[in-house]
Image: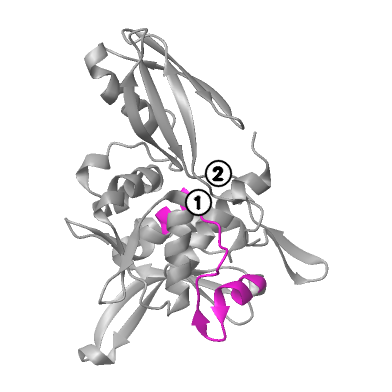
Amino acid sequence: MRTGAELAEHTRNHAEVNFCDGLRTVCVNLRSSNAREEGIVRAISNNGINTVVSSWFESKNSNPSREIESIKPAHNGGARVRILWYNLRMSNPVGSLELPRVLYARKNLSISLTERQREILIGCILGDAYIALLGKIRVEHSIKQKAYVEWKFKEFQSVCYAGGPREIIHKLKAMNGKEYHSLFFLFRQYFREWRNIFYLEKQKIFPKDLWLTPLSIAVWYMDDGCWTGKKAVISTESFKGIYRTFMQNALFNQFGIETVIGKNEKLIIRKRSHNRFFNLITPHIIPEMRYKIPNPVTTFHVK
């Protein structure tokens, strides 16, 4: 296994995978100076190896930090595959920002987040959630996204006020008093430390060394992302200047996802990164939000 320091470097390391039998069972043996991995895939024929190998790595051995760079026939009728590594996933890489999981309201009064809750909450805060000065978090979405709000509340019920999501009606002066119906719920008032990390005075920011996970990015995308039919876009207008650069660096350095900032200040996933991006987030997209992803990737199993 790699050390934390090696993982934090985000260097691109090459490793070779030997496929021993190109007809039926293909034994995968990843060899490099720091890692070793084994697995099984099944091939129909020598001609189908490229497709079979790609499918195996995208589904049964999913890891967005690597991609197949080349596949060449091996002398034994199988295939030699060169893998491009970006990094290996870990929960707390060296040099990354540490977001507290144990939170205190007073010295002897605390709550704890699970790792899954922490990952989802990062996505919520990058998206639509708001942290008040004293540490209370408000999650609010249109009533049309009721299933999404209920999913979030279920995930965070242990750290929220009781009662579940409540409906609220906003009257929009800019639209001649038109009513906007939404659902919201509140986290208990323990998240002042998170407020200090994600806000500079009253402005939400993207912390420089924030370590993302596929689940975090998926929730962020469900909150503020959309699929236009040609491109994937995330609304990032609330993030200014250098914080957009931090955002882009995090996606590229951690996952190899290339992005640009559009004229409308939205984050656009480059076309050449579409497959990697949607392979990364689709397993975490809830059924009611799958309208935000293109059809070719909707067959992934939601965790």
| Mark 2 residue element | loop
In the image, 303 versus 69, the foreground residue is 69
Which range is magenta? 193-219
Q: CA distance from mark 2 to mark 1?
A: 8 Å
Which disc, if any, is residue 89? 2
Neighbor class of circle 1 (other Cα within 10 Å; few <14, some 14-19, many 20+) is many
Task: Look at the image and say whether residue 196 sits in the magenta stretch.
Answer: yes
Would you say 147 lies left or right of 207 here? left
Q: Is residue 297 above or below residue 78?
A: below
Describe residue 231's horizontal placement relative to residue 217 as left or right: left
Q: Are marks 2 and 1 in contact (CB under 8 Å)?
A: yes
Q: What is the count of numbered marks?
A: 2
Q: Amino acid at mark 1?
A: Thr
Q: Earlier in the sequence, mark 2 or mark 1?
A: 2
Residue 3: x percent and y percent? 68, 41
Q: Is residue 267 above or below residue 204?
A: above
Pick the front one: 299 or 3 = 3
Can residue 216 be seen?
A: no
Q: Mark 1 sits on what residue?
A: 213
Q: Indicate the position of residue 82 as horizontal and vertical percent values.
A: 41, 29
- Counting from the top left corner in percent of width and height, residue 228 is at 19, 60
Disc on res. 107 = none
Q: Percent position (x, y) of residue 10?
A: 54, 49
Who's the residue at 46% across and 43% down the image?
65
Relative to residue 5, is residue 150 depicted above or below? Answer: below
